[in-house]
């Protein structure tokens, strides 16, 4: 019996973009179901009753929640093709560490940069720039975070790429000017079809940010 793969996702989600990249790298065909996270559909509530969030990967009727967990699941289930995680235990641990850093440290100021004003906005910008610098330093002179091959951490961070332009606009800074190595890395990643097809349009993201700012009174 063929695998049934469904992805519950919402077009601006950086987390869903990760999952789409991983599925594309593995050549996995799936059904995409647009799921607005502000509207808790019966299917979303059934498949993710704890967090009630997207993305949710459904494989043969079984839900897998949280994008980083989905990347590992995809890598293990479809292990016969392109490896996402490094095989070396130490390198794997480092990839997981930095992916966790992105979601624990980078995520918060990445939305506060457009959602807040005044002192909170200034603090968010300072923190965001520090995290960009930390991630650029972690990349070093390597072509990809995992070394010579595109992999887990590249996917984890490139999920945010569609939001970079909004961060620059509302934070009034230039990633290309301040973080040239990161810029080179993003351009290299954008040469991959899996990445390009997974990403949302950056200008459309900015339009969506204006909607959110109005919604939350920013």
Image: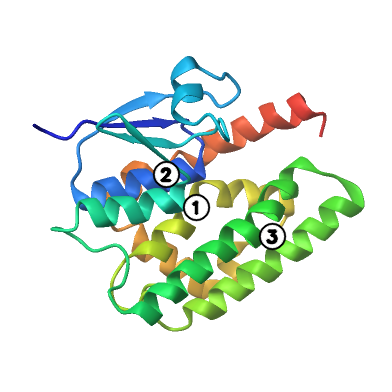
Label 2 packing within 10 angstroms: few (<14), some (14-19), many (20+): many
* Quadrant assignment for the N terminus: top left
Q: Residue at x 39, y 81 (%)?
A: 90
Question: Which residue is located at x 37 percent, y 63 percent?
Answer: 152
Image position, residue 96 (x, y; %): 46, 67
Question: Which type of secondary structure does the marked residue at label 1 adopt?
Answer: helix
Q: Of the two numbered discs 1 and 2 on the same chain, state the one appearing first in sequence.
A: 2
First in sequence: mark 2 vs mark 3: 2
Which residue has dot 3 on it? 173
Q: Give the answer, above or below, for where 183 lies relative to 91.
A: above
Instruction: Name which residue lies at 36% across and 53% down.
Output: 71
Mark 3 or mark 1, whichever is nearer to me: 1
Dot 3 or dot 1, earlier in sequence:
1
Q: Are marks 1 and 2 in contact (CB under 8 Å)?
A: yes
Residue 17's disc is 2
In front: 174, or 8?
8
Q: Work out whether residue 62 or residue 84 is closer to the camera in this orientation and state it.
A: 62
**Dot 1, how many residues are within 10 Å of its Cα: few (below 14), some (14-19), or many (20+)?**
many
Foreground residue among 153 and 75: 75
Residue 201 place in picture, x, y as percent? 46, 38
Up-down: is 12 above or below 131?
above
């Amino acid at each position: 019996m063929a695998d049934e793969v469904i992805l519950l996702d919402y077009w601006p989600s950086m987390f869903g973009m990760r999952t789409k990249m991983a599925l594309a790298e593995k050549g996995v065909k799936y059904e995409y179901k647009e799921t607005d996270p502000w509207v808790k559909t019966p299917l979303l509530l059934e498949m993710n009753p704890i967090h009630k969030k997207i993305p949710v990967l459904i494989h043969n009727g079984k839900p897998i929640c949280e994008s980083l967990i989905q990347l590992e699941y995809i890598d293990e289930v479809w292990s016969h093709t392109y490896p996402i995680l490094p095989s070396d235990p130490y390198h794997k641990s480092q990839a997981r560490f930095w992916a966790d850093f992105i979601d624990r440290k980078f995520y918060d100021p990445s939305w506060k940069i457009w959602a807040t004003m005044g002192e909170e906005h200034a603090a968010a910008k300072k923190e965001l720039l520090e995290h960009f610098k930390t991630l650029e330093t972690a990349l070093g002179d390597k072509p990809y975070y995992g070394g010579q091959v595109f992999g887990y951490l590249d996917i984890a961070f490139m999920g945010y790429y569609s939001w970079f332009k909004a961060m620059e606009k509302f934070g009034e800074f230039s990633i290309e000017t301040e973080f040239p190595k990161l810029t080179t890395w993003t351009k290299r990643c954008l040469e991959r079809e899996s990445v390009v097809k997974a990403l949302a349009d950056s200008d459309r993201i900015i339009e969506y940010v204006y909607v959110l700012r109005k919604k939350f009174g920013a």
